[in-house]
Amino acid sequence: MRSRYIIVTLVAIAVTATTAYYFANVIQYPAKGTTGVVEIYMTTERWRWDPKVISGIDATASSSPQTGVFADTTIRVKTGSTIVIHITNLDSDTAHGFQIDEYQVNAFIPPGETITIRFVADKLGMFIFRCNVLCGVGHPSHVGTLIVGG
């Protein structure tokens, strides 16, 4: 009877250790000092950015409506991450652009089309991204914030 108890106990310890190791690795991924790919699907129209889906470790995006059609959009990513942004222009009659000076990102988004931008977030800080195509009266407010840290 005692040997059965010891075997059951050892199996339980092995299962617990394996499960703990698995979850510890999931929680800690990526390991400190490593980075991954952050993929962002975002739309733009009439002077607003709207992040729809973001995937990747240590990344968030939000768009909070303010007044009218303007929005306060913030994207946060881990330093060293490869950022892939897919931007769809929902306007059928107006072109937009996407620019981040510090990362030499400068893209044109034709009406009704989707573009993809890729860069490595290797600079720590807060960066403004903006529409770089004169797109109408709300153009000066067509901005967002990229925060890179961690």
Image (tube, rainbow, N blue to C red):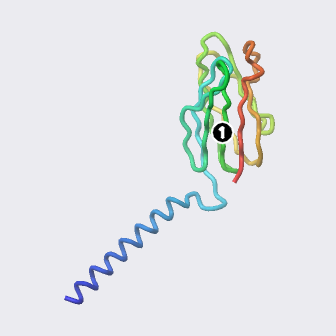
Relative to 137, residue 126 above or below: below
Q: Amino acid at mark 1?
A: Ile
**Measuring 59% from the left and 16% from the top, which residue is drawn there?**
112
Is residue 40 found left or right of 15 in the rendered image? Answer: right
Q: Quadrant of residue 22?
A: bottom left
Image x and y of residue 20, in percent: 44, 68
Indicate the position of residue 27 as horizontal and vertical percent values.
52, 59
Task: Give the residue displayed 59% in from the left and 36% down from the top.
Answer: 40
User: Which residue extends farthest top?
Assistant: 93
Q: Quadrant of the N terminus?
A: bottom left
Relative to 27, is 80 above or below? above
Provide the secondary structure element on which disc 1 rests: strand
Query: Is 54 above or below relative to 71?
Result: below
Q: Quadrant of residue 6?
A: bottom left
**Going by the image, does 85 lie left or right of 107?**
left
Residue 111 drawn at (x, y percent): 63, 15
**Residue found at the far right of this picture:** 102
Q: Residue at image x 58%, y 40%?
A: 39
Q: What quarter of the picture does the C terminus occupy?
A: bottom right
Mark 1 — residue?
Answer: 75
